[in-house]
Amino acid sequence: MSTSPVPSGTFTPRPGAAPFHKQVLAQTRMETRLLLRNGEQLLLALVIPVIVLVGGVLAAGRVGLDFPAGAVNTLTPGVLALAVMSTSFTSLAIATGFERRYGVLKRLGASPLPRSGLLLGKVGALLAVEVLQVVVIGVVALLLGWSPSPGLVGLLGGALVMLLGTAAFASLGLALAGALRAEATLAAANLVYLLLMAGGAVVIPSTSYGAVGPLLELLPSGALGNGLRAALMDGTLPVVPLLVLAAWAAVGTLLTSRTFKWE
Amino acid sequence: MRYGDTLAVDGLSLEVARESITAVLGPNGAGKTTTLETCEGYRRPQQGSVRVLGLDPQRDRRDLLPRIGVMLQSGGAWSGVRAVEMLRHIASLHAHPLDVDMLVERLGLDSCGRTPYRRLSGGQQQRLALAMAVVGRPELVFVDEPTAGMDPQARRATWELLEELRADGVTIVLTTHYMDEAERLADTIHVIDHGRLIATGTPFDLTRGAGHSTIRLVVTEPFPAGAPESLQQALGPLTEVHAINDQSLLITGPADATTLATVSAWCEAHGVLPESLSLGQRTLEDVFLQLTGRELSA
């Protein structure tokens, strides 16, 4: 520890907030780095989706699961949906739960960063991680023989589904993290993820679930999965899934704004 | 301020002068943190008003926050973030932050700069929290128990930094339950207990006011019932007698020959043997004991 004093005037007050866009950029960078640094988060973001994709394509051939469009073409949009869900819901909820626990939100609440800046920073980090996921999953899928031909409408539709899916799951994840303790959030976010992955029509089309299929289309997971499949396989703008996701985003936002506790 | 049935801060009224160090002193649970958090805008007072730099901490929060620095008592950083990385992040939210490297070196954080927050020692976490509070070049800094759990070297570095901040025109409000910290640093001390202000003054006013000194008397065996009261009677109204426990007394007042003679005579009359008898300046500890009848040290 230095005991030699610094020149007088070093600490003379010169307060001020950085420009808003710089604050948001700093927050985005910080949150992205932290998301990618965490081993469990990386597992959730990249390893599990890639395993599901590779495993699914290999298994489909063995057990004779019949996908008219081919296993890899059907499963890839679903795995992209799974990746969006893992990042915007599970990772976000867990990270935010622990931010509350460790007083990070409290400390940032006393910094110049407004709450809107904090939220934008989180959204920016989610989108950055999702771009990385799309690239990695896309490359693996192409290696497995994925041959998408969505056209411009399908690409636009796919991007919209991912954005609205992110909004819906992120708002629900924040609602969870803002209401429960950190450990309970961790458990609940993982449980919901597993349940939706298995039975929520994310990876596999809702039509494969028999009679409950139409109900699953109303879940955010089903809407996200079916929406991405419709966009990337059929090249259409999936209106119904987009409306379902928008409705969930509204519900999640309302819940979060009503119940979120910062400490 | 009320939490459930507990009145944490009650009718507290105090002012802080600019470019000074003000210590809010009190035992654990006295309401120090609640008072600070009300000034920082975390809590809305149920009654009364708070103005910080002339602003309402709740209504004018966005204008106020860039101008103040806040050091929380614990936490405030991601568990996986590296120490210097966290400090740089807070710096980047400000328009004219301090030189991060200078601050890191100044507070001895260079050796643990790449250590994740969760693996920092308690003292390192405290120093990081202090660095985060001052990096934005605030006009006013709130520090909550800045040196709790620090080793002596880190404490000294913290004190020196706070003194330099004051010399450069920063206003500092700190809470502490350490006497020596308040005596060394503070221009003004507010002593609070049970959420109420019980004394205000400079360290000099509080300890040496009215020509008071103290006599501490410890005896070998518990004194008989009613003994402290009889000593109080013998000494008269200019002197105050406090029984710290059943074997020691704190006597505050003029420590002249008459007082000492009276104390000796009282020992003889009650058949108690003094184990130690010490004369001294009144300390803040004594002041607190006198005001509340309790020891301050946590």
Image: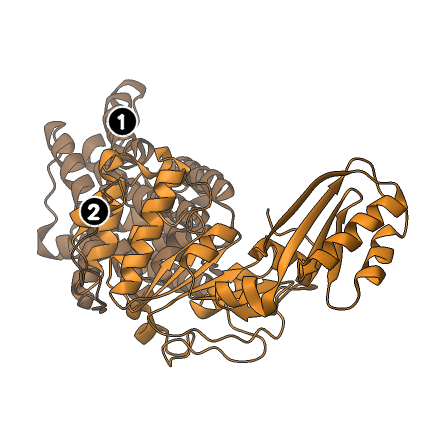
> Which residue carries the number 2 mark?
A4
| Disc 2 from disc 1: Cα separation | 57 Å
Q: Amino acid at mark 2?
A: Ser
Check chain identity for marks 2 and 1: say if they share one.
yes
Q: Which is more toward the observer, B193 or A239?
A: B193
Q: How many marks?
A: 2
Q: Amino acid at mark 1?
A: Ile
Residue B290 picture location, percent across and down: 68, 60
Residue A113 picture location, percent across and down: 28, 63
Give the SS element for disc 1: helix
Q: Quadrant of residue B186?
A: bottom left
The mark closer to the camera, 2 or 1, is 2
Give me the chain that's brown. Answer: A
Label 2 neighbourhood size at 10 Å, few (<14), some (14-19), many (20+)? few
Q: Chain of mark 2?
A: A
Q: Residue furthest top?
A: A62
Q: Quadrant of residue A140?
A: top left
Whichever of callouts 2 and 1 sits on the residue coming sooner in the sequence is 2
Q: Which is more toward the observer, B242 or B52?
A: B242
Q: Are marks 2 and 1 in contact (CB under 8 Å)?
A: no
Residue at 23%, 69% in the rendered image: A15
Residue at 24%, 21% in the rendered image: A58
Residue A79 picture location, percent across and down: 26, 38
Left or right: B130 in relation to B208: left
The colour with which the image depicts chain B is orange
* Colour setup of the view: by chain
> Which residue carries the number 1 mark?
A51
